Amino acid sequence: MATGEDFTTRLMNDMDPALLDFVKSKVNSFVKWDLIRFFHENPHTVDTADNIARYTGRHPDTVRPELDDLVESGVMNRREIGQTRIYSLVTDDEMRASIEEFIVACEDRHFRVRAVYHIIKSMR
């Protein structure tokens, strides 16, 4: 059994190291995957968690902590306007390039399977 697990782990880790790190450290939930895809498609969005949740078809209580995690990991910016938190995609060229690379890689079914594997593994 351990041999099968080792093979599966090797197979699932067979991806570009930078992309593997991005998936493990930034896109470690399906909600974050949706948020990163949304902001990639709408890079100039500056809005509240409630509105972002509506745009992505998610519940605000689910989106808020994930946006805050993305802020902590350097993917998103957050600022306070009065009592309201506003989120936007970082302007950092390197991070935006990593996001672009991830989104382009997602066009490949094999990459998506590997990314899903790592997200599920991180949820355990």
Image: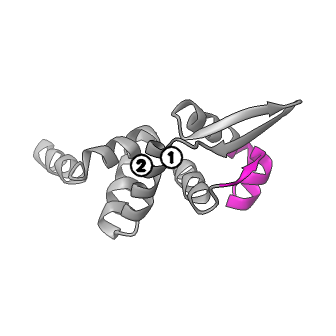
Q: Position of residue 19 (x, y in %)?
A: 33, 49
Number of the label disc, if any, that sits on residue 52: none
Q: How many marks?
A: 2
Q: How far apart, in angstroms, are the residues tagged by discs 1 and 2?
A: 17 Å
Magenta range is 44-63
**Residue depicted at x 54% and y 41%:** 75
Residue 62 inside the magenta-drawn segment: yes
Q: Position of residue 106 (x, y in %)?
A: 40, 63
Label 1 secondary element: loop
x and y, in percent, of residue 27 in the image:
47, 46
| Residue at 34% in and 69% down | 109
Quick one: which residue is furthest to the left in this view? Answer: 3
In the image, is 13 to the left or to the right of 83? left
Which amino acid is tagged 2?
Answer: Ser
Judged from the image, the secondary structure of the residue bearing numbered disc 2 is helix
Q: Is residue 12 visible?
A: yes
State the residue position of label 1.
Answer: 29
Return the residue at label 2.
Answer: 98
**Quick one: 71 or 31, which is closer to the camera?**
71
